[in-house]
Image (cartoon, rainbow, N blue to C red):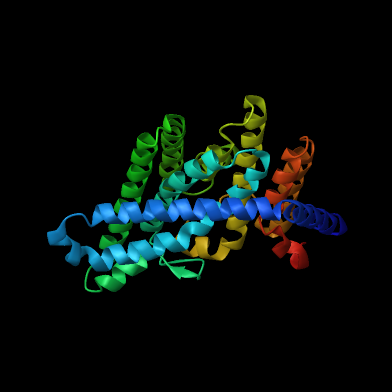
Amino acid sequence: MALEHALLDEMAVAHDQQASRWAEKIGLFVMDVEKRYLSETDLFISGCSRDPLLAELMAPTTEAIAAYLAWAKWICWSAANLSTLLVDTAPAAQRLSVSMLAYVGGRLIDDGLDGHLDYRGQRPSLVAEFRRLRPEAPLNLACSLSVYWGLLLIHQSFKRLRQLGQSETQSQLESLFDTLTVGFLAEAAVSGSITTAVYTRIATRKSAGYDLMLYKPVVQDLEPQTRATLLSLLGRMSVLSQIVNDFHDLEEDRDRGQMNAFLIGVCDPKAARREVLHRAKELWEDSCKMPEPVSGVIASMVANLHLDSLRETVE
């Protein structure tokens, strides 16, 4: 137990040091990205309201979607840590702000497929909003609408990247969408126990592929070898994040029949916390081998996975 707590302490210190050193630069980058992203969401909503005869009919729906998209601007916060590796952050801010549309689109698809009514109890999902707007309609209509609006956002993201001349970022997102789609479909096919290799492949395709939609646009201009190593570590971090989520969602996933590392034989539910911290330690040690400032960025982002919630109950 002492070793696990020492790891959490070390990660917390690294996170605080990184935050203290780069708070101003990260904060300015977040402000720039959020401003650009909100402009992109306004453009998307105006496009959905361009038919004057249907705009009034569509207004309750587009207003609900606009409010949800504005709330979702926080999704850039983790990726913003990567801005400390850049000299000129403006191109990355533009790429990230447009890529966020595709990322939110993925969330809407996931909410529709799984019937999520809220985001961790913090805010109603669009599935719930569509249910509120059409309470007489069946739940599957609200779920289908969430999926369709998600696909529209992904389409909008690709279209805007093309219009802005960001063909490399567009190509990267299209490739990642292909990657995570296979993960989505494979997860839906899981029934009973699967091997660790299969779970890791699904998580890598789905969770890592999804998160890289935010990370790749930011680090696109870095030196190729540094970028490749950094993205590999970030992909592993996303898989760890999925396992952490599985740990916290264990009971809910059991009730819903959802794929969960602790329910399908991948991780031992009797030693769940120790399992998570062991994996975190491996990633932490590998990230610390990277030269500064890359190691500090990764260390801070790993520490930001809220592993400290395991501190008091670690086995």
Between 225 and 120, the residue placed more toward the observer is: 225
Which image quadrant is residue 48 in? bottom left
Q: Is residue 12 left or right of residue 255?
A: right
Q: Is residue 252 left or right of residue 310?
A: left
Q: Is residue 70 visible?
A: yes
Q: Is residue 264 left or right of residue 15?
A: left
Taking the spot 60% from the left edge, 53% from the top edge, the residue there is 28
Tell me if residue 1 comes above or below residue 194 in the rendering. below
The total number of labels drawn is 0
| Residue 252 image offset from top left, x and y in percent | 52, 65
| Residue 185 image offset from top left, x and y in percent | 40, 43
Which image quadrant is residue 140 in? bottom left
Between 236 and 216, the residue placed more toward the observer is: 216
Between 27 and 105, the residue placed more toward the observer is: 27
Q: Is residue 267 left or right of residue 125?
A: right
Tell me if residue 214 comes above or below residue 228 in the rendering. below
Taking the spot 59% from the left edge, 36% from the top edge, the residue there is 219
Quadrant of the snapshot with the C terminus: bottom right
Quadrant of the snapshot with the N terminus: bottom right
| Residue 55 image offset from top left, x and y in percent | 19, 62
Taking the spot 34% from the left edge, 68% from the top edge, the residue there is 129
Q: Is residue 78 visible?
A: no
Tell me if residue 273 comes above or below residue 97 in the rendering. below
Between 28 and 68, the residue placed more toward the observer is: 28
Taking the spot 77% from the left edge, 47% from the top edge, the residue there is 281
